[in-house]
Image (spheres, helix red, strand yellow):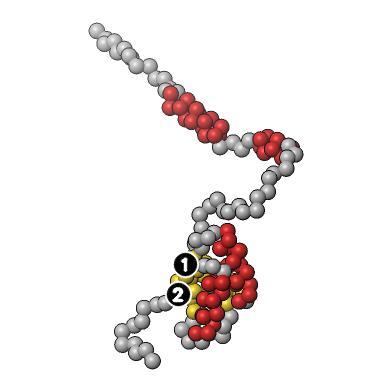
């Protein structure tokens, strides 16, 4: 007597995971789409934006500005060559925008102190109160003269 073998499970493709992925992709593309029509409409409206004289920055102050003083007296502000007059102008403008602006002065150890004193005076004239002098730790056995 032959045995009957019945197949209870039929082979079928489960589409549920594929449908879930398709829906997730649709949601992703809908969220990440740039709506260019909104930007064009904004520029089509002609309005006069109000101007204020005492507006201050809405963002927090940037990192401290780095002033480097070389042994010959040349200055760099954030890696850019600059004169002492330009330094005062740029620091004054930055201080007006960010009242809590900080400055780090990094001077050559073999330069005249007069160059560093001039930078300190310029920072004081620009009303910058957060001033730091960058130094390095001396090795053992170093005698100061």
Task: Give coordinates of residue 75: x percent, y percent.
Answer: 57, 77
**Tag 2: Cα neighbours inside 10 Å, few (<14), some, or many (≥20)?**
few
**Image-quadrant location for residue 77:** bottom right
The residue wearing badge 1 is: 130
Q: Contact, CB < 8 Å: mark 2 with mark 1?
A: no
Residue sitting at x 40%, y 77%: 136
Which residue: 52% across, 34% down?
Answer: 28
Work out whether residue 122 or residue 65 is closer to the camera in this orientation and state it.
122
Corner quadrant of residue 94: bottom right
Nearer to us: label 2 or label 1: 1
What is the number of the mark on residue 90?
none
| Residue 2 makes an appearance in the image | yes
Q: Secondary structure at mark 1?
A: strand
Q: Is residue 53 left or right of residue 4?
A: right
Residue for point 55% across, 50% down: 58
**In the depicted structure, whether residue 81 falls above or below residue 100:** below
Crowd rating for badge 1 (residues with CA inside 10 Å; few <14, some 14–19, many 20+): some
Against 98, residue 49 (above or below) is above
Where is mark 2, residue-wise? 133
The one of 73 and 114 positioned closer to us in this rendering: 114
Quadrant location of the N terminus in the rendered image: top left
Q: Secondary structure at mark 2?
A: strand
Q: Position of residue 132 (x, y in %)?
A: 45, 71
Does residue 129 sit above or below 36 in this rendering?
below
* Residue at 47% over, 25% down: 19
3D distance between C-alphas at marks 2 and 1: 10 Å
Q: Quadrant of the C terminus?
A: bottom left
- In the image, residue 72 lies at what x, y percent? 56, 85
Residue lying farthest to the top in this orientation: 1
């Amino acid at each position: 007597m032959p045995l009957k073998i019945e197949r209870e499970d039929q082979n079928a493709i489960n589409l549920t995971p594929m449908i879930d992925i398709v829906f997730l992709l649709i949601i992703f593309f809908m969220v990440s789409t740039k709506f260019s029509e909104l930007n064009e409409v904004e520029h089509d409206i002609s309005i006069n934006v109000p101007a204020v004289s005492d507006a201050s920055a809405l963002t927090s102050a940037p990192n401290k500005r780095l002033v480097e003083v070389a042994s010959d007296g040349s200055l760099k502000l954030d890696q850019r060559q600059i004169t002492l007059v330009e330094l005062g102008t740029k620091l004054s403008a930055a201080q007006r925008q960010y009242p809590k602006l900080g400055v780090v002065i990094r001077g050559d150890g073999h330069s005249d102190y007069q160059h560093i004193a001039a930078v300190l005076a310029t920072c004081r004239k620009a009303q910058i109160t957060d001033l730091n002098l960058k130094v390095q730790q001396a090795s053992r056995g170093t005698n100061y003269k």
